[in-house]
Amino acid sequence: EAGVTQFPSHSVIEKGQTVTLRCDPISGHDNLYWYRRVMGKEIKFLLHFVKESKQDESGMPNNRFLAERTGGTYSTLKVQPAELEDSGVYFCASSQDSWGVAQRIFGSGTRLTVV
Amino acid sequence: AQSVTQLDSHVSVSEGTPVLLRCNYSSSYSPSLFWYVQHPNKGLQLLLKYTSAATLVKGINGFEAEFKKSETSFHLTKPSAHMSDAAEYFCVVTLTGGGNKLTFGTGTQLKVEL
């Protein structure tokens, strides 16, 4: 079974540019989560999709971040315009239901560096 | 509110010696606690979980953790380290009953030396 796939694995962009991260969840997983780890800090929740709907976006840092999940399959996270403090590792996870934390499968992350 | 503190950012052990990664938590309600591991270029993998059943929890790869309510701790241990255990480990807390809000610790990088 394929896991949660994220790409690119690494991205280096200049301040002010736009970057789009993509997450392909496990097939059949309705729940999709985005997390972020800023350098040296803890991993923090960004938002949660159930199918194509945003269930909880309370962790989104500001309106430069836009997440979409059209059709309820893969998801994108766009940062526009990128700032230096957006550098970090962005993780995606998916699960069939939202209650079982242990069933949440994580991707390997996208390392974003804004210079 | 809930929080988790991983007391060591880096731990170094020799192969074959015990591993202890420390985690303390704070939670207003009954917590669920987890340990995840991330090997280089891999996703976060669940090692073990505590969800109000047995306080000593056994996980994969010989790891175990003990929930101590009186000490608000959930330390991760392994009797004998292997080179393949070198990775970053995260202690995570959430409220019992599920929910989406995982609260992660800052991670402990485990180094295993020959």
Image: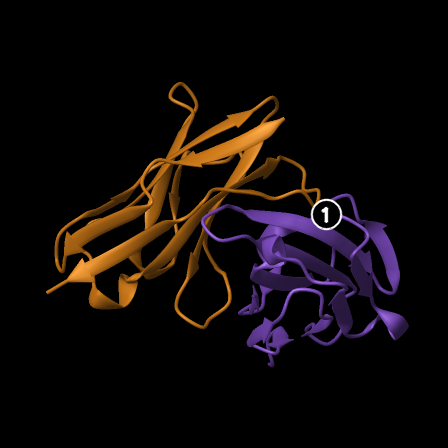
User: Residue furthest toward the top?
Assistant: B70
Q: Residue at x 57, y 59 (%)?
A: A87
Instruction: Tell me which chain appears orange.
Output: B
In the rendered structure, the answer to whether residue B36 lies left or right of residue B32 reads: left
Q: Is residue B96 visible?
A: yes
At 61% from the left edge and 55% from the top edge, which residue is drawn? A36
Nearest to the observer: residue A54 or residue A37:
A37
Q: Is residue B50 visible?
A: no
For disc 1, the marked residue is A61
Please tell me whether residue B62 is drawn above or below residue B73 in the rendered image.
below
Under mark 1, the amino acid is Pro
Viewer-proximal residue among B29 and B57: B29
The residue depicted at 58 percent of the width and 29 percent of the height is: B2
Q: Is residue A77 above or below residue A46?
A: below
Quarter assignment of residue A76:
bottom right
- Which quadrant of the structure image shows residue A115? bottom right
Q: Residue at x 74, y 52 (%)?
A: A47
Q: Quadrant of residue B14?
A: bottom left
Looking at the image, residue B58 sits to the left or right of residue A60; the answer is: left
Query: Residue A17 at x, y = what percent?
Result: 71, 70
**Residue A98: x and y, percent?**
73, 52
Left or right? Give the position of A93 relative to A77: left
Q: Identify the element where label 1 is drawn.
A: loop
Quadrant of the image containing the C terminus of chain B: bottom left
Q: The N terminus of chain B is located in which quarter? A: top right
Residue B55 location, x and y as percent?
41, 33
The colour mode here is by chain
What is the drawing colour of chain A?
purple
For label 1, count other residues whose C-alpha is less than 10 Å away and answer few (under 14), some (14-19) or many (20+): few
Q: Position of residue A72 (x, y in %)?
A: 85, 70
